[in-house]
Every structure is written in structure tokens, then in C-alpha cells.
Image (cartoon, rainbow, N blue to C red):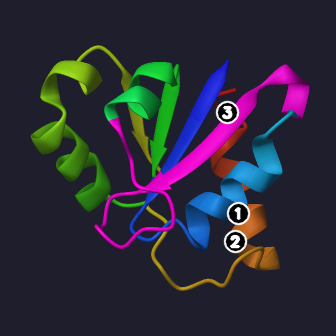
């Protein structure tokens, strides 16, 4: 399964998720951000590639639905409700991600 993790800047939350889940039980994981200055910006190609899309906040879900309605309308979007309070690979962030994402994969 192809997993896509979305946050704003693609520097901390979604990048941490990518590092945790890429290769986990054969899953492929990638990450991107919704902001114009994101490390890697979300693209139609990434959204099309993904089987399951995890967004860190409701605003990310809303942005995807507004900008790419034709692509995400038939995709499963999961909002993890993880606020931007963590550094890259923060131990608490890793535990939150694992506890939320494992039930979907």
C-alpha cells in the first residue's frame, strides 16, 4: 500500500511519519506539505500515487479537497489531528503517529 503523509511544511510531522512507515510491512510511504515553501510540495502525481492519505490537521484535508477535488474525491483521507508542536523525529510524535496510523494499515 502507498501511504502519503501531509502537513504544512513537510519538515517535521509528515517527514517523521514517512521515516517511520516507509518499508513497514512492505508499505511505501512518502510525505509532502501544503504550503508554497514546503520542503516537498504536494502534487497531483503524489495524490494519485497514494492509496491512503494521512493529513496532520483538518486544514490540510480542506486544502486538498479545495485544490484537488477530482483527485481526492475517490481517495481515503484520514485526519490524524496532530498539531505542529513537535520537532522532527520527536519521540512523542513517533508514538502518536504509530498509535493512530497502525489501525489503518
- Residue drawn at (63%, 42%) of the image: 30
Residue 79 drawn at (x, y percent): 40, 48
**According to the image, label 1 marks what residue?**
16
- Vertical side of 6 occupied by 52: above or below: above
Q: Which residues are magenta?
A: 24-43
**According to the image, label 2 marks what residue?**
93
On the image, which quarter does residue 83 sit in?
Answer: bottom left
- Residue drawn at (61%, 83%) of the image: 86
Magenta run includes residue 38:
yes
On the image, which quarter does residue 87 sit in?
Answer: bottom right
- Vertical side of 7 occupied by 37: above or below: below
The reply to whether dot 1 and dot 2 touch (C-beta < 8 Å) is yes
**According to the image, label 3 marks what residue?**
103
Residue 18 drawn at (x, y percent): 70, 50
Left or right of 59, for residue 88: right
Assign the N terminus to one quadrant of the image: top right
Left or right of 74, for residue 82: right
Identify the element where label 1 is drawn.
Answer: helix
Q: In front: mark 2 or mark 3?
A: 2
Assign the C terminus to one quadrant of the image: top right
Amino acid at each position: 500500500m502507498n501511504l502519503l503523509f501531509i502537513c504544512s511544511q513537510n519538515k517535521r510531522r509528515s517527514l517523521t511519519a514517512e521515516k517511520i512507515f516507509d518499508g513497514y510491512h512492505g508499505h511505501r510511504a512518502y510525505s509532502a506539505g501544503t504550503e508554497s515553501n514546503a520542503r516537498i510540495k504536494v502534487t497531483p502525481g503524489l495524490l494519485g500515487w497514494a492509496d491512503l492519505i494521512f493529513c496532520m490537521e483538518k486544514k490540510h484535508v480542506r486544502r486538498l479537497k479545495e485544490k484537488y477535488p477530482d483527485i481526492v474525491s475517490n481517495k481515503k483521507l484520514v485526519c490524524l489531528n496532530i498539531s505542529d508542536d513537535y520537532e522532527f523525529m520527536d519521540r512523542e510524535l513517533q508514538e502518536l503517529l504509530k498509535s493512530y496510523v497502525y489501525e489503518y494499515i
